[in-house]
Amino acid sequence: MGAGVGGYVQITLQTLESKYDPDTHQLHRVSELSFTGAPVPLDRTAPPGLKRSSVALVPDTVPAAKLGLGGVKPRDVLSFSLYALLDDGSHADMGLTAVQSITAELEHAFGGKWAGFAVALAPGGGRFKLVADITVKFRRRQRAKRPFQVIPIVMAFGTDRFVDHYLLAVIAAQETVEKVDTSVTQPY
């Protein structure tokens, strides 16, 4: 990233032009990748005391939200819990359950491999923070010194469909103890 002193940088990918030709099935995209200085982040280690809840959805129940992890099969997700970060700093388990019909909806909407989950409790308000505690099987087939696996995350609330939603976040999974942060900026 240059010969700077070091520090943090926020990297934003902004699409300037995106054209899809339905006749040739080709997508042409022009994007701008910008780098701006960022403050040193606080130590965001996993808070102690995260406990998995026994909240589970009955299969016929309409979930408060649906969540999908891309590029992985359901069997690749070894454990996954989702918590809402409350104003007092505590965490509330949102009750995550793997659901095959949500996986099928994700694969139909976006193609490729997906793991779908129902969320029993949705966060309230316009702004909220979520903590995801995920263990996935890392599929290492690359020859790179530091291979990575990109895992997109999408979320839909209530009876909303995934085909009507944007990307929520991206996990850049690596075989490393280093923290790898990503950022997604989208219009709504």
Image (cartoon, rainbow, N blue to C red):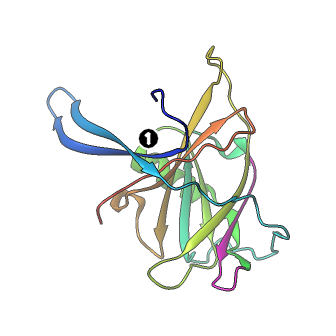
Q: Quadrant of residue 60?
A: bottom right
Q: Residues within 10 Å of mark 1 (few under 14, many from 20)?
A: few
**Residue 10 horizontal/vertical position (percent):** 44, 48
Closer to the camera in the image, 150 or 61: 150
Q: Residue at x 23, y 34 (%)?
A: 29
Residue at the front extreme of this rendering:
5
Name the image quarter holding the C terminus: bottom left
Closer to the camera in the image, 173 or 121: 173
**In the rendered view, would you say 53 is above or below 163?**
below
Disc 1 residue type (three-letter):
Gly
Determine whether the residue tagged by mark 1 lies in a helix, strand or loop. Answer: loop
Q: Residue at x 37, y 61 (%)?
A: 165
The region drawn magenta spans: 78-89
**Residue 46 horizontal/vertical position (percent):** 76, 60
**Residue 164 horizontal/vertical position (percent):** 34, 61
Give the residue at mark 1: 111
**In the rendered view, would you say 87 is above or below 17?**
below
**In the rendered view, would you say 10 is above or below 80?**
above
